[in-house]
Image (cartoon, grey):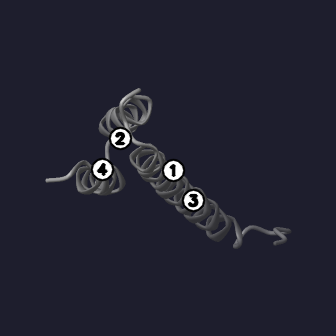
Amino acid sequence: MPIFDLQIFIGQIGRDVQHVKQTQSILQLLWDVSHLQSMPKHLVEKALSEQLAILTEMTMVSLKIILLDRFENQSIFKHCVGYEY
């Protein structure tokens, strides 16, 4: 398996993992790979691209959780007297 395909595979695992420690390990691996002196520029860019994709996915999931939590909290309080949206 070429390194480029391996980086894509590692990035996909990082996006699919649900545990923070595993995601951190994958991010660290991609970071380390992107800083190897012998790594060609296009592979460095791919490693950093996969790392950014994982971080973006984590941010989107966190944002969804926060928004759902806020929506549920508003639904609880909407029956209170004097509650305004």
Task: Point out the tag, 4 or 3, that comes first from the N-terminus.
Answer: 4
Task: Point out the tag, 4 or 2, that comes first from the N-terminus.
Answer: 4
Q: Residues under labels 4 and 2: Cα distance?
A: 14 Å
Task: Point out the tag, 2 or 3, that comes first from the N-terminus.
Answer: 2
Q: Residue at x 33, y 39 (%)?
A: 26
Residue holding disc 3: 69
Q: Residues under labels 2 and 1: Cα distance?
A: 12 Å
Residue 15 in percent (x, y) is at 36, 55
> What kind of residue is marked 1?
Leu
Task: Point out the tag, 2 or 1, that comes first from the N-terminus.
Answer: 2
> Which residue is more in the foreground, 40 or 34?
40
> What kind of residue is marked 2?
Thr
Q: Residues under labels 2 and 3: Cα distance?
A: 23 Å
Residue 58 in percent (x, y) is at 48, 52
Taking 31 as reference, is 60 above or below it? below
- Residue 52 circle label: 1
User: In which quadrant will I find the C terminus?
Assistant: bottom right
- Residue 23 circle label: 2
- Callout 4 crowding tier (Cα within 10 Å): few <14, some 14–19, many ≥20: many
Task: Point out the tag, 1 or 3, that comes first from the N-terminus.
Answer: 1
Q: Residue at x 56, y 65 (%)?
A: 68
- Residue 7 circle label: 4
